[in-house]
Amino acid sequence: MDNQVTATSKFLSFVLRHQLRAIGITLDHEGSATWKTLIAAATASGQSLDRSQVEAVVQDNDKKRFSISADGQRIRQPRATRQAPWQSRRPANAATTAPPDAFLSRSRLAERVPPEFLAPLAK
């Protein structure tokens, strides 16, 4: 990769993988942004960017950090370093998994804690 492609790749990694709001864009529910939004926001933030540069990064990147939607209108980072808020953090068998002690209800906690620790303190 030449220097321009490397610089564009680093910029896209920064924006799409680490600092989603660094240039003032938000991603949709699939974690993607439109070309128009990405290029306009990058230009407004002082980064020279056009579609051909981004396509060169997507095609030349051996780690496949970015992908273009099937209709060619959106770009996304398929393996985000942070989990999106709409993605579940619960395991697939969460219904059968017992809750940890830290999340016990007040009544269940009272069953496990000795009564002398629950008594109000004297002033």
Image: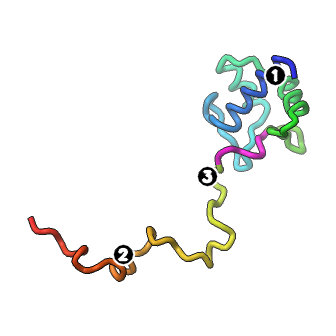
Check disc 1 and report the residue beneath it.
50
Check disc 3 and report the residue beneath it.
85
Residue type at mark 2 is Arg
Badge 2 or badge 3: first in the primary sequence: 3
Mark 2: few/some/many CA within 10 Å (<14, 14-19, 20+): few
Check disc 2 and report the residue beneath it.
106
Give the image location of residue 42, x and y in percent: 70, 24
Mark 2 and mark 1: Cα distance apart in space: 57 Å
Which image quadrant: the N terminus?
top right
Residue at image coords 78%, 45%: 78
In the image, taking residue 53 as reference, residue 41 lies left or right, namely left
**Structure colour scheme:** rainbow
Residue at image coords 68%, 44%: 81
- Whether the magenta-drawn stretch holds residue 78 is answered as yes
Residue type at mark 1 is Asp
* Label 1 secondary element: loop
Camera-side residue of 48 and 62: 62
**Residue 91 appears in which quarter of the rendering?**
bottom right
Mark 3: few/some/many CA within 10 Å (<14, 14-19, 20+): few
* Label 2 secondary element: helix
Give the image location of residue 116, x and y in percent: 22, 77
In the picture as drawn, the residue positioned furthest to the left comes out as 123
Badge 3 or badge 1: first in the primary sequence: 1
Which span is picked out in magenta? 76-82
In the picture as drawn, the residue positioned furthest to the bottom comes out as 111
